[in-house]
Image (cartoon, grey):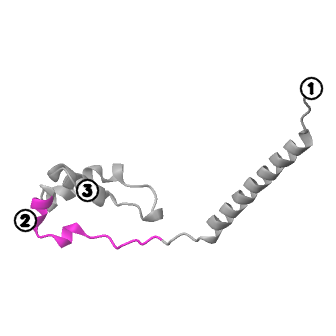
Amino acid sequence: MEFSNSSSNSSSSSSSSSSSSEEEVLDLALIVACPRQSKVIRPRVDHSRKWREDEFITRFRMSKETTRFVLDLIGEHIAHKTTRNHTVSAEMQLLIALRYYATGSL
């Protein structure tokens, strides 16, 4: 006949669970103690002013006037409804898409 000492097994399992909970508390303390880095938000470039007309056409494969026309057509459909979190403007979204379509990369 074998007898198992259940009290010794339960004490070892309770000590292992308490050590794991202590580790969890320490992990949480480390997370709380390490503050997040602040986001760096750079000013956005105004591409219609930055590039001469010929440079703009080379870069986006469309004239500034045509770009403004397309933006007037679709701008309200692609513009974000909020100004929180420094959203990307409708103009910038259009220029990013045109640049991608023109070159296949950003």
Amino acid type at image mark 1? Met
Between the C-alphas of marks 2 and 3, the distance is 18 Å
**Tag 1 near tag 2, CB within 8 Å:** no
In the foreground, 43 or 63: 43
Q: Which of marks 2 and 3 is nearer the N terminus?
A: 2
Above or below, 73 against 51 in this view is above
Above or below, 64 against 74 in this view is below
Q: Quadrant of the C terminus?
A: bottom left
Pointer 2 residue: 54
Pointer 1 residue: 1
Above or below, 64 against 52 in this view is above
Q: Residue at x 28, y 49 (%)?
A: 74
Pointer 3 residue: 96
The crowd level at tag 2 (other Cα within 10 Å; few <14, some 14-19, many 20+) is few
Horizontal side, residue 59 vs residue 73: left or right: left
Q: Which residue is drawn at 31% across and 53% down?
A: 75
Spot occupied by residue 34 in the image (x, y as percentages of width and height)? 59, 70
What is the number of callouts on the image? Answer: 3
Spot occupied by residue 45 in the image (x, y as percentages of width and height)? 27, 70
In the foreground, 102 or 95: 102
Helix, strand or loop status at disc 3: helix
Amino acid type at image mark 2? Asp
Q: Earlier in the sequence, mark 1 or mark 3?
A: 1
Residue range in magenta is: 39-59
Above or below, 1 against 19 in this view is above
Horizontal side, residue 44 vs residue 2: left or right: left
Looking at the rendered structure, which numbered label has been put on residue 83?
A: none
Amino acid type at image mark 3? Ile
Residue 91: quarter of image? bottom left
